[in-house]
Amino acid sequence: MKLGILEQMPTPKGKTAEDTVKETISLAQYAEQLGYKRFWFAEHHATKGMASSAPEIMMAAVASRTKQMHVGSGGILLPQYSPYKVAAQLLQLQALFPGRIEAGVGRSPGGGERVRSALADGKENQLSAYPEKLETLVRYVHGQQSNGVRATPRTSTPPSIYSLGLGENSAEVAARLGVGYVYGHFIEPTRGQAAHQIYRQQFAPGNLNAPHALTAIFVICGASDAHAEELATSQDMWLLRTEKGLDSRVPSVEEAKAAKKTERDQQKIQENRRRMIIGGPETVRKQLCYLSDLYHNDEWLILTNIHDFHEKRRSFERLISLF
């Protein structure tokens, strides 16, 4: 089983964005030592608690401080941007770090309408144009013309393109265009089997010669089930508050335990657990193996959004040692 990391760079309470960036780079270097194959960065805007707003810059920072690990985005908000500009950035990264650049792109607006409009410089919502923009991006990174121009620099090989999605429709788009597919189990845990099946059945070679399916999921691997549950209270409260549009910094375990929760809050926390694997090593191994058999995916992208950086590192240590 292959494992990678998807980093949203959540900022723990009591720390700054600068602290989070420093710890994230340190984590990426350590992840390479542990044997993780790839390290990707999300794109989030107008949020106090997530420090990854420019994945391309974080990709360059981490690639320059590691040796072999693939670095990527998970994902660039393609509907808000020019495919030409995105391609130029990716090709520049590929020229700097040949064979190590992976570009996950997604359909998300990036936030509310004001955020989306600011990203798109006031242009109208282009979410429906995502398949067309993705196709144009693929052409550009392969050195082909679109609208009479080619993107530069013209690298010997193109960066790998992945399309992020939450179900069957997104899987069909990725398969038709011959790009990799990333299913967001950490957002939508109920449609993964169908999405992965459709992607494999309908894949036509394009940017990639063969299908490559990844699944992103929250995982906390504690020393025991009880230890993992203790750590998870931090992530539970972070996710609950983030979805409510409240403070998206990661609270400590102590703050999370002391926070008042309504009955609906408790229900939501339990619902969100379907998006996660929480447990000691054996519990995590069994659940990941079960989902791997269900999805027939090629690799996992792991998110671990807890307050304690040392415990976050230890969770990744325990996880990689299982496989």
Image: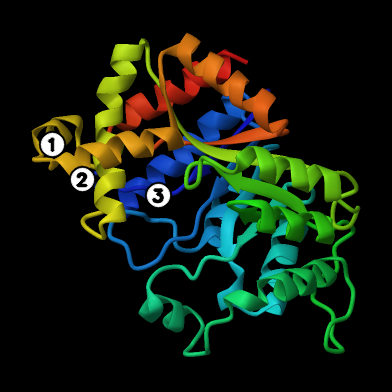
Label 2 SS: loop
Residue 287 seen in this snapshot = yes
Residue occupied by mark 3: 21
Does label 1 or label 3 sit earlier along the sequence? 3
Residue 38: image quadrant is top right
Q: Residues within 10 Å of mark 3 (few under 14, many from 20)?
A: some
- Residue 130, numbered label: none
Residue occupying image coordinates x 47% and y 47%: 187
User: Could you tell me how far apart the alpha carbons at marks 2 and 1 are, in whole angstroms?
Assistant: 10 Å
Residue occupied by mark 2: 13
- The disc labelled 3 sits on which kind of residue? Val
User: Could you tell me how far apart the alpha carbons at marks 1 and 3 are, in whole angstroms?
Assistant: 23 Å
Instruction: Give the left or right position of residue 280, taking residue 35 as reference.
Output: left
Give 163 or 96, whichever is nearer the viewer: 163
x and y percent of residue 213 in the render? Answer: 72, 41
User: Which quadrant does the C terminus fall into?
Assistant: top right
Give 282 or 41, whichever is nearer the viewer: 282
Residue occupied by mark 1: 255
* Nearer the camera: disc 1 or disc 3: 1
- The disc labelled 2 sits on which kind of residue? Lys
- The disc labelled 1 sits on which kind of residue? Glu
x and y percent of residue 104 in the render? Answer: 65, 55
Residue 210: image quadrant is top right
